[in-house]
Amino acid sequence: MLMVLGASHHDLELTQLERLSAGPELLAQSLRQLGAEPDGAISGTVLLATCNRLEIYVDADRFHDAIDAVTDRVAQVAGISPADVAGLLKVRVGAPVAAHLFTVAAGLDSMVVGEAEISGQVSRALSSAQQTHTTTPVLNALFQSAARTAKQVAAGTGLGSAGRSVASVAIDIAVAELPSVTDDDDRPSNSLSTATCLIIGTGAYARVVAAALRARGCTRLQVFSPSGRADSFAATHHAEIVAPGQFAEAIGKADLVVACSGTTGGVLDVSTVTAALSGREHPLQVVDLALLPDVSAGVRALPGVQVVDLRTVSHAAAPEHREAISAAQDVVIAAVARFEDDQAIRTLDPAVVALRQHVSVAVEKEMTRLRAKYDNDVAAEVELAMHRVTQSLLHTPTLRARELARTGDSAGYLQALHTLFGIELPDGPQQH
């Protein structure tokens, strides 16, 4: 059965989500071990971890055991009790799983409705699971359908056509406060053509930030990597590398600092920022997009520092036009219905295969007798004729299986196979 255990900015305060989401790499490794257990309750998992959500999609064999297993692994990695984790994670089972993931992938469940990044994050979550062999056919189908749905929403509804994202909204909020970035009428402008922008971090989200800054006219881009991996990022994005010894000085001279390392937390500490503020005329504008904040609590309290973070975005991000959202929801609803139909049809796949095998065995038995009696040309002609007849005869039972699967009347089909042909599937229809 399909399940998802998760939490997002809709369910929890960001501080709770930060606590729950600690160590996504360790969690992914721990979940891989679950799927490898020979008698475990879980056949496969896909982990979707972003700056504002943590969701574990599960192909489960036993409902309660699967929930307990995933809850225990999250608790171990996050360092909190299983009881606390159970209280934080929302559980969805069956059809609501597809409805939720498709809504997420389409950007309808995001802080910024219609954001573009989430569909890529969903695709990368599946790729990661495939590379580590933790996915299953039904999870593959689920995530591939979600990706197709996201593309249909983007292409057919106009939702997200403006390129809005958590990063772009946060940057626009910060840019509006920059005194040096104004137009001829002394009004805030979204251009950063005269600004120096410093990115902290080099991961996937840093690449999104770089693109957003370039789109707003930034010509001087700097990068600082807490992990020392700035070289390739700088080369790709035409950015200047800030060495550790130059970090405070670079902050002091930057017009905008965007922190998105999310690996260690507290990269911008009080001593570093205090040194950077010395002699600075204007407030330091900082965008902190890391779920585990890069800006320490002490820095936020310093005079002369203005921080835009995920909480700011969630309060400031206005939704897209109602028509676009409604159209996107219609696309999602139709896609969920198709996915559920496909999965229902698959429940009778073993029965259809068994019927075809039953007929094939009978045909091959007769052909063995005919090949011994007639020459090759005649036997081949008879075999072709028998193949056409069997395909014609099996066409209607195959279509009927799909119809009955959609209506949930699989039991009647299985009983008919047993009564007419003696075919019996002891384990019943399967989805895996």
Image: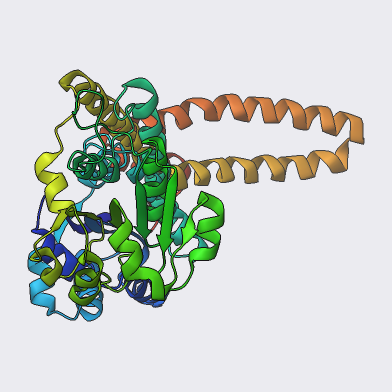
Closer-to-camera residue (81/192) = 192
Residue 306 x %, y %: 14, 54
Residue 172 sits in quarter: top left
- The answer, for residue 294, to whether it is visible in the render is no
Rendered-image quadrant of the C terminus: bottom left
Q: Residue at x 32, y 58 (%)?
A: 253
- The answer, for residue 273, to whether it is visible in the render is yes
Residue 279 x %, y %: 21, 63
Q: For this view, does 336 lie left or right of residue 148?
A: left
Residue 385 x %, y %: 73, 25
- How many tags in the picture? 0
Colour basis: rainbow
Q: For this view, does 99 lie left or right of residue 151?
A: left
Q: Is residue 163 above or below residue 347?
A: above
Residue 173 x %, y %: 19, 41
Residue 326 sits in quarter: top left
Rendered-image quadrant of the N terminus: bottom left
Closer-to-camera residue (212/323) = 212
Q: Residue at x 15, y 63 (%)?
A: 17
Q: Residue at x 42, y 56 (%)?
A: 222
Q: Residue at x 84, y 40 (%)?
A: 371
Q: For this view, does 30 lie left or right of residue 132?
A: left
